[in-house]
Image (spheres, grey):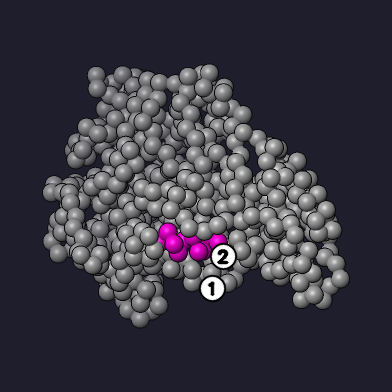
Amino acid sequence: MKQRLLSLTVTLCLMLGLFTSCGEEEGFLFRYDVPQEITSLDPQFTTDPYAQQLILHLFEPLLRQDEEGNLVNAAAESYQVSADGLTYTFTLRSGLTWQNEAPLTAHDFEFALKRMFNTEALSPHAQTFSCIQNAQRILDGELDYNSLGVTATSDTTLVIQLDTANPLLPQLLASAPACPCNQSFFIDTKGKYGLSRSQLNTCGPFWLRTWDDTFIQILAWEDYYQADTVLPSGVNFYVGRETAPLDLMLDDKADFGQITYREVSTAQRAGMTVLSYEAQSWVIAMNQEDSSLANTAIRQALASCVDREYLKDNLTSNLTLTGYLIPNQVKILSESFRQVATNAGHTANLSQGRSLLQEGLTQLDLTRLPTLKLLVPENDNHPYIATLLQKLWQDNLSVYIDLEILPLDEIQSRVASGDYQLAVVPLIPSDNTPSSLVSQFTTNSSENDFGMADATFDALVTQVDQATTLDTMAQALSQAEQYLLDNACVVPLYQEEIYYAMRKGVSGIQYNPFGNFAYFQYATGS
């Protein structure tokens, strides 16, 4: 009944054009753009990062991030971890409910996690949770998904048992795939769960009022157990507006969005708060399915000539030279990975290049390397940097590289289809977990556009995922990153700062550049 009354009140306010002043304590209605239609809000199955950000507004996980980005209890009132790190016992808050007024219990979390491992419809996120007891045996077809080590021993107690200790489990349980799912409601949707507003039952700080292919509106839920922490009235998500985010903010039609480094001063002069993230690395990708570049020595020869000292005076202000792949923004829990990494990274070695090239040519039974083609983005300073690389390869190896200048989206499309030899492309982790970027190079990864199939490297990434302490995780990740560099699978060039702006009068929007998560629960505006 409360929900129906709230919906009626909101409708009247919208009709009268008085939403932002309807009630003395009404918060701000934010406006934010997403680039593509959201077709599913099923927490356990969608891989769309924009859908996942909505899910974290609409559902309540066991844990979530607070205003400072720290993990805090959410649906869980508390939890305990056994001394060996293999058993997590969560105590849920009492009185939690779903939007349809059904109780939210530990059984809903058990059903959600086990549902991911139902091999009749296996979740794309299942492997991420493979540390849970029996998970790998279920994925290998040895056990039924009901054997997963997750048990609701009462309505308020959830026990998760692991095969191997995983210090990142709390972080995983704060992600969209770990959000609860009510089994009874799920069954009633008859296979259409999360595909429309009527097939969705939510339990988070916001509820879904409108959802179509061009517009989504979520509103603060008054029955949320911490309703006083939900500061906005809601958020309007606009789909596919073609106007640049900065122009929308300057025209008072949006409150938050990505801007270019050239737009930073304009945004600041307009009183906007500008956020910057060292989250993206630019690399030279080498297609290992190419007949020449499949040879490790040939790739190493090309990599040996990437002399960053020669490039350093020709970068724009948003770029910083780097010999690493994993950007500064990536953390292992609260620590920057780059601060705890133990690997040396990539350095140029001009004197070694010719001997490596000759080694590769001998192995390929060639007298000279055929002319290769480097795809280069047309924007910013990338074309000029590419001419410098071209000169380094010619002067030091007598290797000729043709340049093809193209829009970045066309390059990315060609790289994804394998239609390239060399390409200057950005790499960004898909989420803020340690192995996210390096796992893109594993043999079976859907993001592996590099023709890489290397069992040794796959095993290194597995060691990252199976690490039982933060120290061993950092060491394993360092080894995996260095393996990519030593084998010249890609060559790092520079790290790019990504910029986002909040319109003047707006504060408190949380943003995670990995996965494009904008979170509005603690945001205020005027």
Q: Tell me which residue sits at (55%, 32%) in the image.
A: 259
Give the number of the mark in front: 1 or 2. 2
- Residue 435, x across and y down, in percent: 46, 59
Q: Nearer the viewer, residue 378 or 155?
A: 378
Q: Which mark is residue 381?
A: none
Tell me which label, 1 or 2, sits earlier in the chain: 1
Q: Nearer the viewer, residue 239 or 266?
A: 266
Query: Dot 1 corresponds to which residue?
Result: 456
Residue 476 is a magenta residue:
yes
Residue 477 is a magenta residue:
yes
Q: Tell me which residue sits at (76%, 72%) in the image.
A: 359
In this rendering, is residue 245 above or below 397?
Answer: above
**Residues under numbered marks 1 and 2 in contact, where contact means CB atoms less than 8 Å apart:** yes
Q: Nearer the viewer, residue 493 or 101?
A: 493
Horizontal placement of 296 versus 196: left or right?
right
Residue 493 shows up from this direction: yes
- Bin the neighbour count of mark 1 within 10 Å (Cα to Cα): few under 14, some 14-19, many 20 and up: few
In this rendering, is residue 2 above or below 373?
Answer: above
